[in-house]
Image (spheres, rainbow, N blue to C red):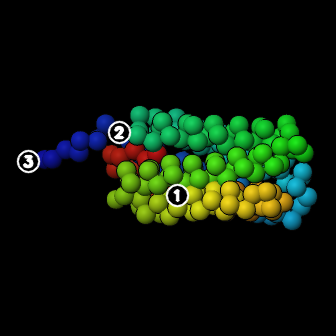
Amino acid sequence: MTTSDTTSHLSVPPTWVRVLLGIVLILAGVLILGDVAIATLISTTFIGIVAVIAGVFEIVHAFWTRGSRGFAWQIPLGILYVVFGVVLLNQPASGVLFLTYVLGLLLALSGFIRILLSLGHWRESGRAMLLSGVFGILAGLVVLAGFPKTTLWVLGLLLGIDLISQGAAWLTYTRLPADRGTVLC
């Protein structure tokens, strides 16, 4: 007698896709951390480019795993990263204060979404995504609590660290075989 998995109609993306998402997010974070000491205008432009790239990869990954519970969360998260990056590219001088505040909100929201995702995938290394989500919320609170004093340094530092933690969390999901029958978000 065989038993069947009730989620067998869903599939986990291939390991290389999960690895690619994790690596891209980590590299984006490392690149941003290397930019913290540069003038605010240059760093906001650079952060804008990296945020757009990270957002596009988040959206691509969401479509790769469409049909999963996280799809509805990943699309807005990716769009938020893209919109944030485009605004930075178009208004680097006058938008720094406003965008620092928006980044604080974005980091907190992103962390909250990752905490929700971790609860749905607790058996599949959800603890790593939970830690990533907690960090996102804490990073957002640091930005918001110190505003506007944090404007000169916090954009690069916190976004870089947040992307690295999110990438590391996605890399923990590479341990799952692609035919496990669960969808990661």
How far is mark 2 from mark 1, CA to CA?
Answer: 25 Å
Which is nearer the N-term, disc 3 or disc 1? 3
Dot 2 crowding, Cα within 10 Å, few <14, some 14–19, many 20+: some
The residue labelled by disc 1 is 133
Closer to us: mark 3 or mark 2? Answer: 2
Q: Is residue 88 above or below residue 172?
A: above
Q: What amino acid type is highlighted by mark number 2? A: Leu
Q: What amino acid type is highlighted by mark number 3? A: Met
Closer to us: mark 3 or mark 1? Answer: 1
Q: Is residue 82 left or right of residue 37?
A: left
Dot 1 crowding, Cα within 10 Å, few <14, some 14–19, many 20+: many
Q: Secondary structure at mark 1?
A: helix
Where does the image place residue 83, in percent across and percent down from the top left?
A: 71, 37
Where does the image place residue 150, in percent across and percent down from the top left?
A: 78, 61
Which is nearer the N-term, disc 3 or disc 2? 3
Q: What amino acid type is highlighted by mark number 1? A: Gly
The residue labelled by disc 2 is 10
Dot 3 crowding, Cα within 10 Å, few <14, some 14–19, many 20+: few
Q: Is residue 116 left or right of residue 74?
A: left
Q: Residue at x 48, y 36 (%)?
A: 72
The residue labelled by disc 3 is 1
Q: Secondary structure at mark 2?
A: loop
Where does the image place residue 138, in percent across and percent down from the top left?
A: 59, 62
Closer to us: mark 2 or mark 1? Answer: 1
